[in-house]
Amino acid sequence: MRKIIEVPYIDQTQNWPTGCESVSSVMLLQALGFSVTVDEFIRDHLPMMPMGDGTGPDPDSYFAGSPYDPESFGCYPGVIVKALNSYFDQAKSGTQGEAASGEVRWQAQDATGISTQQLLREQIDDGLPVLYWSCIDLKPSYRGPWWTLPDGRRFEWTSNEHCMLLVGYDTDKDTLIFNDPWDGHGVVDYDRDLVEQRHREQKERAVIVIPER
């Protein structure tokens, strides 16, 4: 059986070389019926902090660097949850594009540690894409670099970090289907075992959206 959610595709490569999280978020927003660009999302909603000489932010609090800078790093679910909910809050107040349904109010949640099978059952089968951390081109992750956080703690980045939008699955081919914003990959099937392994290497980070109760 093949299940896929039709989602507009955006390529990050030229304009936002380290902006996979923001690009995937905007694809998700557009799938929900919102009218927003990647530049608007970054400018108005994404918390960012520049890297220093051996120093930098906690990637769960701020994007480490800038999505426009190929030498920057990225961010984790805490940043994207904050950015998406900032967007949703403005949408409620009428200052952002409205959802296609007109009445749906959305909330982003950190889904780190939730099994992929549960994400498929509770999100994809309900027509809701998932922001899913894995590795770029499914390359193995590796440790480092390291930097010092503002509070003095030492932080270790896991390199080859990449965020894609999970949009479906194929049980016959044993694949997961993604809108992969990197290098024009488009809507692509990835071997489920391999992409889940890379997902575990990135601490099973994920972000979901749910209708507000």
Image (cartoon, helix red, strand yellow):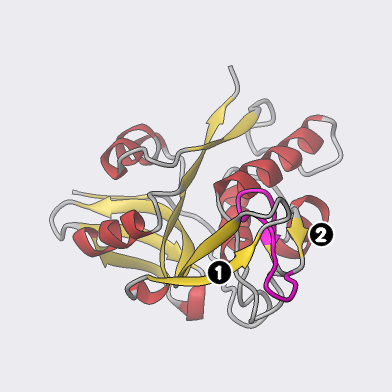
Residue 98 visible in the shown view: no
Is 21 on the left-hand or right-hand side of 200? right
Residue 20 percent across, percent down from the top left? 56, 66
Placement of 112 over or under 202, stated as above or below: above
In this view of the protein, which residue sits in the foreground, 153 or 14?
153
Residue that carries the numbered disc 1 in the rendered image: 146
Quarter residue 81 falls in: top right
Disc 2 residue type (three-letter) = Arg
Q: Residue tagged by mark 2?
A: 43
List x then y, in percent, for residue 56: 69, 64
**Location of the C terminus (image quadrant):** top right
Residue 169: image tag: none
Give the CA distance from mark 2 to mark 1: 27 Å
Indicate the position of residue 45 as horizontal and vertical percent values.
77, 50
- The single residue placed furthest to the front in the displayed view is 152
Q: Earlier in the sequence, mark 2 or mark 1?
A: 2
Q: Secondary structure at mark 2?
A: helix
Judged by its main secondary structure, the magenta piece is loop
Assess whether residue 53 is covered by the magenta stretch. yes
| Magenta span of residues | 51-63
